[in-house]
Image: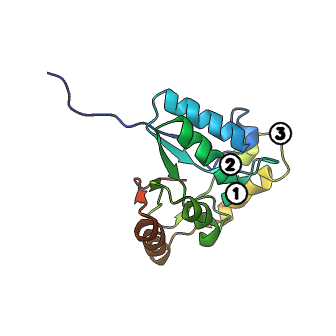
């Protein structure tokens, strides 16, 4: 008997946790993010979870202009659902995290269901040489930062994106 279940593959091509030193394969520019997203969709990913990166030094970026450089390309070249982060990074304010999704009105967005400690400071000890000056302090500082997503923040995201843009939300996930 055949199983009636289906598998949905979601691919996060960048995320916000990794730094450029951690992988030479981390896409940094809008062109690289678009190319890797399209390749993931062609390989079978049904959902592409998207973050933007500063194309100069690879740090996570909330800039809507960067998102708009790759979102239309991916949408034109694939039928994957584009899932824009509302998490961004522990360094971003709620308004920064919402700027790109509000501009793009995505079909889907991630939504972390609460605040969390996000300590990955130990990763800073794994590398001796860094591609960019920001990476080591960024990782080291995570033992004293919190990803803030209060109940009020979540309600605001649901209201502004869900009700305001018709965006649906993926399962609770780390951004």
Q: Please say if 57 is above or below 113.
A: above
Callout 2: SS: helix
Query: Residue placed at 61% from the left, 71% from the top?
Result: 95
Q: Which residue is mark 2?
A: 69
Corner quadrant of residue 81: top left
Quick one: label 1, few (<14), some, or many (20+) residues within 10 Å? some
Q: Quick check: can you spot residue 19? A: yes
Q: Are marks 1 and 2 in contact (CB under 8 Å)?
A: yes
Corner quadrant of residue 12: top right
Q: Which residue is mark 3?
A: 128
Query: Residue placed at 76% from the left, 47% from the top?
Result: 58
Q: Which residue is mark 1?
A: 65
State the residue in front, 11 or 138. Answer: 11
Foreground: disc 3 or disc 1: 1
Callout 3: SS: loop
State the residue in front, 99 or 77. Answer: 77
């Amino acid at each position: 008997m055949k199983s009636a279940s289906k598998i949905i593959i979601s691919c996060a091509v960048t995320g916000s946790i990794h730094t450029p030193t951690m992988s030479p394969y981390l896409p940094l520019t809008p062109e690289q993010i678009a190319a890797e997203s399209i390749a993931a969709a062609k390989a079978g990913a049904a959902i592409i979870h998207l973050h933007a990166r500063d194309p100069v030094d690879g740090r996570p970026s909330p800039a809507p202009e960067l998102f708009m450089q790759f979102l239309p390309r991916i949408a034109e070249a694939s039928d994957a659902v584009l899932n824009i982060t509302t998490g961004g990074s522990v360094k971003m304010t709620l308004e920064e995290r919402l700027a790109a999704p509000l501009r793009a009105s995505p079909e889907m967005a991630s939504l972390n269901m609460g605040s969390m400690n996000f300590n990955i400071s130990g990763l800073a000890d794994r590398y001796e040489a860094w591609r960019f000056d920001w990476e080591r302090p960024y990782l080291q500082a995570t033992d004293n930062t919190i990803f803030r997503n209060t109940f009020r923040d979540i309600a605001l995201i649901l209201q502004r994106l869900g009700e305001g843009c018709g965006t649906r939300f993926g399962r609770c996930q780390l951004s």
